[in-house]
Image (cartoon, helix red, strand yellow):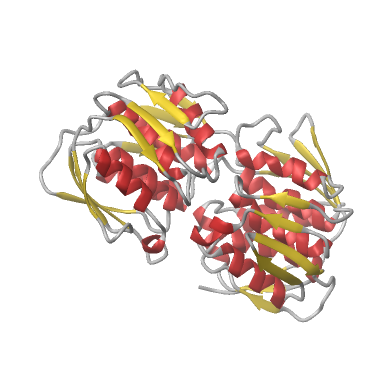
Amino acid sequence: MTATILPGPCSELMATVQVPASKSLTNRALLAAAVAGGGRVVDPLDCEDTRLLARALAEAGWPVRWGERTIEVGPRHPETPGLRRLWLGNSGTGARLLLGLLSATPGRFLVDGGDRLRVRPMGPLLGALRRLGATLDDRDGFLPVTVEGRRLAGGHLTIRPEVSSQFVSSLLLAAPLMADGLELEVEGDLPSAPYVALTEEVLAAYGVRVEHAPTSRRWRIPPGGVRSASFRVEGDWSAAAFFAAAAAVGGGQVVIEGVTTSSRQGDRALCGMLSAAGVKVEEGTEGVIVLGPAQGPFAADVRQTPDLFPALVTVAAVVGAGCELRGVEHLRHKESDRVAVMVDNLTRLGAELEVGNGTVTVRRALPRGASAPVRVTAASDHRVAMAMAVAALARGAVELDEPECVGKSFPTFWEVWSDMLRAPG
């Protein structure tokens, strides 16, 4: 892995950028196509995570053909004897969504991944699947997991997701394959709830009738009803966050193509969060227009939108004292311990942040325009790496140890970022 120097400082941006397709929607559409016995994903995100999931589906028996702008998923081949080994690398979403599908699919499967994925919690999902009749052999709630797949009965089930809404999405995606469908009730907290709404959107596109009242913690999905469909993936608000943060830190205007303020993606909440800091965010004919810089302190709760934390805490560190981000408790379970890594990096760059009671508070602003590069770590986390590019716009040159890890969700990030900085102001 080769370190790189991230450019900065920068001010008064004037650029238009195109963000890639949503990773969350691409992954869910792939799973729904498999459940339907075939389908097409149009304009998908082509990145490490989606390729890992597509390959795992192919190894589990579903033909997957990746074209220039589409992914075609075919009906599953008849079951063949033997254990199918599926490698998910560092894709927590892929592993969790896949475990529900495989538990309801005849066959023997081993789901495994890299060192970081092996310490990401799976227990609430595995326990729920066992209560539905699944046969699983796991490592005390963690990967690797051996699945003895069969048609599950379904019925009523309660779950305490605790650390991730992906457990709920996994069960909902597998529900049409269950003999009695699924009536799922969530007890306790449901972090990242907007991602469950994306799961509902994808299932509906594949013909599944999802019964769920907006204020309810109960979902009902009848058996069957799923059909082959073509699902078009919209732009990714999680990726757009870093370009919006660039405008908040550097000032000027950034037009982000591929996203809309009416999206069901939870991360569009960034619009309101940045607006609270004096950043103007509005819908334009070409995309969402972000006009910076941030004018003053702001507070935001990221419990339902954890992927926004790296970009938002960087903006907060630049704005300075008085900024506060709440709801960060579950971020230690992401690709890295994002709170610890981001606070450490920003502290190295000269900011002062305080962590306590699920809150990160800025005590001293990150200094602007420093000359000597300071080395920071991506901790193999794509969103941390992208956030460090934002920090460099204020602080000055930053040395990043693993720039290539952005390939997990945004392989062309550095090219798009460089084009934004070179655009005439």
Residue 314 visible in rendering = yes
Q: What's the residue at 56%, 40% (across, down)?
A: 21
State whether residue 379 is above or below residue 64: below
What is the x, y in percent for residue 257? 70, 38
Coordinates of residue 97 in the picture (x, y in percent):
38, 43
Task: Please report the residue visible at 49 percent of the width from the left and 32 percent of the height from the top.
Answer: 217
| Residue 302 horizontal/vertical position (percent) | 65, 50
Inspect this view and state whether residue 5 appears.
no
Question: What residue lies at 61% left-to-right and 57% top-to-bottom?
Answer: 328
In this view, the residue farthest toward the left is 81
Quadrant location of residue 388? Answer: bottom right
Q: Is residue 47 left or right of residue 124?
A: right
Outermost residue to the front: 188
Tell which of 97 and 10 is nearer to you: 97
Image quadrant in which you'd find residue 399: bottom right
Q: Residue furthest bottom?
A: 372
Q: Total label count?
A: 0
- In the drawing, does residue 117 fall left or right of residue 340? left
> Where does residue 111 sit, x and y in percent of width and height?
28, 53
Q: Where 140 sits versus 207, above or below? A: below
- Of residues 344 and 124, the one drawn nearer to the viewer in this rendering: 124
Where 289 sits versus 360, above or below? above
Of the pair 349 and 273, the residue shown nearer to us: 273
The answer to whether residue 304 is left or right of residue 172 is: right
